[in-house]
Amino acid sequence: MKGDTKTAILDAAQALIQRGGANAMSYQHISQAIGIRKASIHHHFATKEALLEAVIQRYTVYFLGVVDAIVQSKKSPVEKLRAYAGLFESTIREGKQDKACLCGMLGAELSTLGSPSVAGVRRFYRDNEARLVQILEEGREEGVFHFKGETRLVAAMIFSLLEGGALVARAEGGHKRLHSMAEQMLNLLHG
Amino acid sequence: MKGDTKTAILDAAQALIQRGGANAMSYQHISQAIGIRKASIHHHFATKEALLEAVIQRYTVYFLGVVDAIVQSKKSPVEKLRAYAGLFESTIREGKQDKACLCGMLGAELSTLGSPSVAGVRRFYRDNEARLVQILEEGREEGVFHFKGETRLVAAMIFSLLEGGALVARAEGGHKRLHSMAEQMLNLLHG
DNA sequence: GTGAGTCTACCTACTAGTAGGATGTGGCCC
DNA sequence: GGGCCACATCCTACTAGTAGGTAGACTCAC
């Protein structure tokens, strides 16, 4: 199999970052996780920065793909928002309470990252907020969302809530707690 | 001066964590920052875990002290919430856009921390949410806040929004952006 | 003289990254 | 088809730098 090892490296790296951040992800840990020598990882990703970029890139493409499927679905705006929040909830559940959004984790370590990675994280934030704006506008036009102020800011608010909520919920309450918070936010927009 | 060095160590450690997380804080960095040898830091804080605990403890006492002053002040509930959000905003502004809440940063690295530190971070979250509940209840009774659902969940929501917002805003927009998001949240509760 | 504070000098473990050799595999020439 | 080259993959073995932590000596104030 050709790209198998490469994929295994990306998987391991991503999982490590989602659990403890980029500084807790090392070539040694990856090597132990997938049963390969450290030097072999360097063959696929010359530097840690390159690996980080690749992980961010792959994660962004995947995540936005799922988000776009939600945005373009036939669901109601309320259901779309619920499904969007569900992505964050299932990330936590998936890793039995200790995984958070990759780019949320990296946001904390932003100042220790190289500039290509920083740009990738920034883009992730922007693109997600843009999708949320679409959903919110749709709901506002249909008259199911009622809020004062700019849609742009409500989108930013929801995104920060979910990113922050994923981190906070890992400390206590887990995915159920994040779900409750998301529902409460829907209450505020919807009521 | 007696406790001067100890304070300088705590200050440097806290600043390093607020910028890049606990894993980006090392005895060497602290030593360079305050002009003392690495071994001398060990005299004051035997292990990194002990230092971390002390930083969390001091930060929590200070932060909750300021929060309690806000809660017990004669301000209106809306103004109290604004002042509370202002704490997060000024943290970002203070470190020219690259400092976030200490416990928000540590939340990301939770799985790499020792259990006393984890407990400290958890307590910080709980105590902050409890203060927010007080403010929200007060505003609800006075009839200035209108929202469906449990106060407890709205408090958790606001807290996650501010912690997450502080991290996301460092990537783009800074304290001004966090301020806009906080105002938008007030819009949702107040309108 | 005791003890707090600081120092130099060291230790072991881990970090990212490099050099160079072993294996295998697919294509190409004859 | 057999022989050969080129490339990919993975390995062992190494480097230099950094991590947290320790031992023991010096200094100075009470």
Image (cartoon, coloured by chain):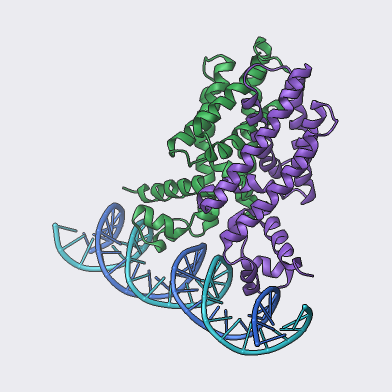
Chain colours: A green, B purple, C blue, D cyan
Q: Is residue A61 above or below residue A55?
A: above
Q: Is residue A187 rendered to the left or right of residue D1?
A: right
Q: Is residue A147 above or below residue B48?
A: above
* Along the viewing direction, whichever of B118 and D8 lies nearer the viewer: B118
Q: Position of residue A53 (x, y in %)?
A: 55, 49
* Along the viewing direction, whichever of D1 and A184 lies nearer the viewer: A184
Q: Is residue A20 rendered to the left or right of residue A2?
A: right
Examine the image and state in which quarter residue A72 appears: top right
Name the image quarter holding the C terminus of chain B: top right
Q: Position of residue D18 (x, y in %)?
A: 58, 68
Q: Is residue B40 visible?
A: yes
Q: Residue at x 44, y 39 (%)?
A: A95
**Residue reaching furthest to the right:** B74
**Residue reaching furthest to the top:** A143
* Number of numbered discs visible in the structure rendering: 0
Q: Residue at x 74, y 19 (%)?
A: B140
Q: Is residue A20 above or below residue C3?
A: above
Q: Is residue A92 rendered to the left or right of residue D28?
A: left
* Along the viewing direction, whichever of A61 and B94 lies nearer the viewer: B94
Q: Residue at x 62, y 37 (%)?
A: B126
Q: Position of residue A189 (x, y in %)?
A: 66, 18
Name the image quarter holding the N terminus of chain B: bottom right
* Along the viewing direction, whichever of A127 and B98 lies nearer the viewer: B98
Q: Is residue A148 visible?
A: no
Q: Position of residue A50 (x, y in %)?
A: 53, 54
Q: Residue at x 64, y 46 (%)?
A: B103
